Image (cartoon, rainbow, N blue to C red):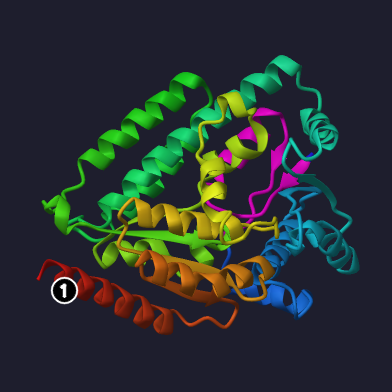
Amino acid sequence: MRVSFPYMGTTVVYKKLLELLGHEVIMPPKPSQHTINLGVKYSPEFACFPMKVITGSYLQAAELGAEVIITSGGHGPCRAGFYEQVHRRILKEEGFDIDFIVFNSMFRDSKQFFKNIMKLKGNSSWLKVGQSLFMVYDMIRKLDKLEKRVQKIRAYEIKKGEATRVWDIIQNQFDRANCKGSIQKAFYDGSQQLDQIKTYNVNEKEKMRIGIVGEIYVVMEASINMKMEELLGNLGAEVERSQYLSQWVAYNALPAFINQTHEVEILKKGEPYIPINIGGHAKQTVGHIVDYSQRGFDGVIHLMPFGCLPELVSQSIIPKISQSLNIPVLTLSIDEQSGTANSLTRVEAFIDLIKGKRIKKIS
């Protein structure tokens, strides 16, 4: 099959899994203004921003010859659960007969989950499928470990942009890895390359840590969130996201006894503020804000796609959480008309506020 997928985060891992299973991968272009314009043109006006961007990505992938699109679904009031039907219709109206394979949590519908695995399996043996899944999951975990290091190094690098440049090289190294040994080598080489980045020595008490929370797509995909992690790093802040691919996979596809994420704990921390499931990542958003506060973070950036219903709910609760836990939170609404300059000004002011708060606390 000629398969494609939404462009989000470290796409090298999606590509690797599909290649290992014998499929021809149609890499979607990294979202650009052209991608956004396409999505806005063909999507319903009231649709949330991620859907519009993904629409543009699918149209680009279809033009490149994709026959099947593999994606994730949604649940609850979050409209991501309807994306597949809407996208299928949009693509059909534009002359593309594309099939969709939609993955939801294995624990919500295990039967459908394994049906999807069967579709992807193709002519591969079950042994090959198992080996490929374990290998790619190992790759995901290693990439996430390295990315977390990048998010810290950026704040102190002497030559700005060096960590981002090395991170791009690391992803290319993993893209060339085809076995467990080569993945381990890519991880070792990547670690060595990060070690070689020259950084300023900063006292532990002077380090600034900022958490990024919000809807998974705008949190993880730098090309549509104004490269928020790089921006914060350039302003001298260590960054930690609420969403990492390894955590998503572990929570949605691994049994609890081998699940290494703290997603359940985060959901419990969000329970007092959002006691029911409202879909999307709203409960995780508030849970992570609580978690960041407890771990001594200096502030939180909340990325909210315009038109996202669950994040709209969490946004209404955040001022109360911010005040009660004494942690600054800046909400940025992101859509096709978001201006980088405006957001940069707001983020810079937010960082200045945090610095002022720290000085006041010391004095």
**Residue type, numbered disc 1:** Lys
Using the rendered image of the protein, determine whether residue 165 is visible from the camera's viewpoint.
Answer: no
Residue 352 lies left or right of residue 317; in this view the side is left
Q: Which residues are magenta?
A: 2-30
At 75% from the left edge and 81% from the top edge, which residue is drawn?
Answer: 45
At 61% from the left edge and 38% from the top edge, which residue is drawn?
Answer: 251
Queried whether the magenta region covers residue 343, the answer comes back as no
Circle 1 SS class: helix
Using the rendered image of the protein, determine whether residue 200 is visible from the camera's viewpoint.
Answer: yes
Q: Is residue 114 above or below residue 128?
A: below
Between 136 and 278, the one nearer to me in the picture: 278
Q: Position of residue 189 (x, y in %)?
A: 32, 32
Report which quarter residue 40 is drawn in: bottom right
Residue 207 lies left or right of residue 85; in this view the side is left
Q: Write down the residue under mark 1.
A: 360
Report which quarter residue 283 is drawn in: bottom right
Between 309 and 88, the one nearer to me in the picture: 309
Q: Is residue 256 above or below residue 25?
A: above
Q: Is residue 117 above or below residue 331?
A: above
Q: Is residue 287 above or below residue 341?
A: above
- For label 1, the crowd category at 10 Å Cα-Cα, with few meaning under 14, some 14 to 19 and many 20 or more, is few
Quarter in which the C terminus is drawn: bottom left
Quarter in which the N terminus is drawn: top right
At 44% from the left edge and 42% from the top edge, which residue is drawn?
Answer: 171
Between 33 and 150, the one nearer to me in the picture: 150
Q: Residue furthest top?
A: 127
